[in-house]
Image: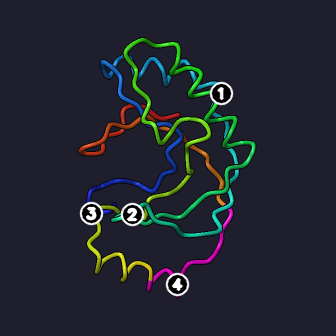
Amino acid sequence: MTANSVPSHLTIAFFEAQSEETAKLIFQNVREDLKPGTVVIPSVGVFFPNVIFAEAVLNAWLLETGRAVNEELKLHDGVAVNRYYRPFSWIPHITLGKTLSEEQMRAAFSYLQKHFCPVTAKVERFGLSRTGPHRELLTS
């Protein structure tokens, strides 16, 4: 992730819009609903075959923040929400590595078995980003 200049983050929503301007409008419309919050990160998980992540517990703050964003997304024609980021099909997580080989996955697990410990984190900032390559469009 760091090699591709992708900062640590917890994705609340993942969607495609017809234009960057539409995506920016959505972010601006929901900005007031985006309040700082706390998440517990107790475990590590995988999305097979090549993603390893730190899993965040879906608490009331995360649920409400995701709900607010998804309600705004529904109001815009031509917006496609990724099926893995819809309410009740979303696993809140912080990607630690992706597109890893089998050997890299083993090495990541080995490292995390020795060094990972549960933490509580405060989310203080929100951003709208574009992927491939990562580029921040707006922040709050």
Q: Residue at x 63, y 24 (%)?
A: 32
Report the amino acid beneath label 4: Gln
Question: Which residue carries the number 4 mark?
Answer: 113
Q: Which mark is residue 3?
A: 3
Q: Are marks 4 and 3 in contact (CB under 8 Å)?
A: no
Report the amino acid beneath label 3: Ala
Distance of label 2 from label 3 (alpha carbons): 21 Å
Assign a secondary structure to mark 3.
helix
| N-term-proximal mark, 1 vs 2 | 1
Percent coordinates x, y for residue 13 in the rendering: 49, 36
Looking at the rendered image, the disc whose residue lies closer to the viewer, 1 or 2, is 2
Position of the N terminus, as image quadrant, is bottom left
Q: Are marks 3 and 1 in contact (CB under 8 Å)?
A: no
| N-term-proximal mark, 3 vs 1 | 3
Please state which of residues 45 and 8 is positioned toward the viewer in this rendering.
45
Distance of label 1 from label 2 (alpha carbons): 33 Å
Write the start and end of the magenta stretch as one range.
110-120
Quadrant position of residue 80: top left
| N-term-proximal mark, 4 vs 3 | 3
Whether 11 is drawn above or below 57: the answer is above
Magenta residue check for 114:
yes
Percent coordinates x, y for residue 138 in the rendering: 42, 31
Assign a secondary structure to mark 1.
helix
Image-based side of 87 in relation to 49, left or right? right
Q: Which mark is residue 33?
A: 1
Distance of label 3 from label 1 (alpha carbons): 32 Å
